[in-house]
Amino acid sequence: MECYLSIKNKNHFAIILCGGSGTRLWPYSRALKPKQFLSFDGKKTLFQKTILRVSKFFKEENIYIVTNEKFFFETKGQLSDLNIANINIVREPDSRNTLPAISYGVREINNISKNAIIGVFSSDHDI
């Protein structure tokens, strides 16, 4: 399979959605520790695996994590565990599901680049 994405192009941006509550994976996933912040292999969390996967194709400064206020510090902590500091964390004013989160991230990127090409990624999948 060929990849048509030009690696780390300055006009390519990634949005990583990281606000889900993970209620369908209860009792493993809890309100303050949803599934994206859990490790199922004893190594990296699903969120950390997503960051590492996406950062192969996008510049760190072109990656935008959209999360909510209650996950902000967990997000920062997990990025710190990976020694990553240049990724943007966007806090939603209110959690309103997937489409508003994507729209919020797109709005932030549009302030920087009117011609951005944007990929959207979930932080709670194991690929």
Image (tube, rainbow, N blue to C red):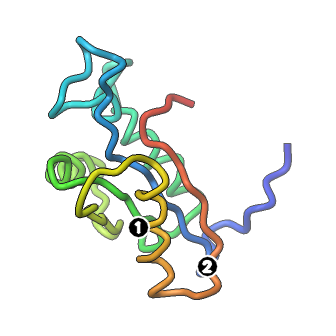
Q: For label 2, count other residues whose C-alpha is less than 10 Å away and answer few (under 14), some (14-19) or many (20+).
A: some
Q: Who's the residue at 36% across and 19% down the image?
A: 24
Looking at the rendered structure, the secondary structure element under dot 1 is: helix
Where is residue 25 drawn, in percent x and y? 34, 17
Residue 3 image offset from top left, x and y in percent:
79, 53
Q: Quick check: 45 left or right of 91?
A: right
Q: Give, as a three-letter code, the residue at label 2.
A: Ala
| Frontmost residue, 9 versus 21 | 21
| Residue denoted by label 1 | 104
In this view, the mark in front (1 or 2): 1
72 over 58 or under it: above or below: above
Q: Is residue 72 above or below residue 21?
A: below
Residue ID at (15%, 48%): 70
Q: Amino acid at mark 1?
A: Tyr
**Location of the C terminus (image quadrant):** top right
Identify the residue shown where x is 39% and y is 47%. Answer: 97
Q: Which of 2 and 28 lies nearest the eye of the viewer?
A: 28
Disc ID at residue 116:
2
Vertical placement of residue 87 versus 76, above or below: below
Residue 117's x, y, as percent? 65, 72
Whole-percent x, y for residue 72 in the image: 19, 54
* 22 left or right of 116 in image: left
Q: Element type at marker 2? A: loop
Residue 100's place in the image compared with 127, above or below, is below
In primary-sequence order, the first of circles 1 and 2 is 1
**Snapshot quadrant of residue 29:** top left
Please tell me which residue is depicted at 48% across the width and 59% down the height of the picture.
102
Separation (CA) of disc 1 from disc 2: 14 Å
As drawn, the residue found furthest toward the top would be 27
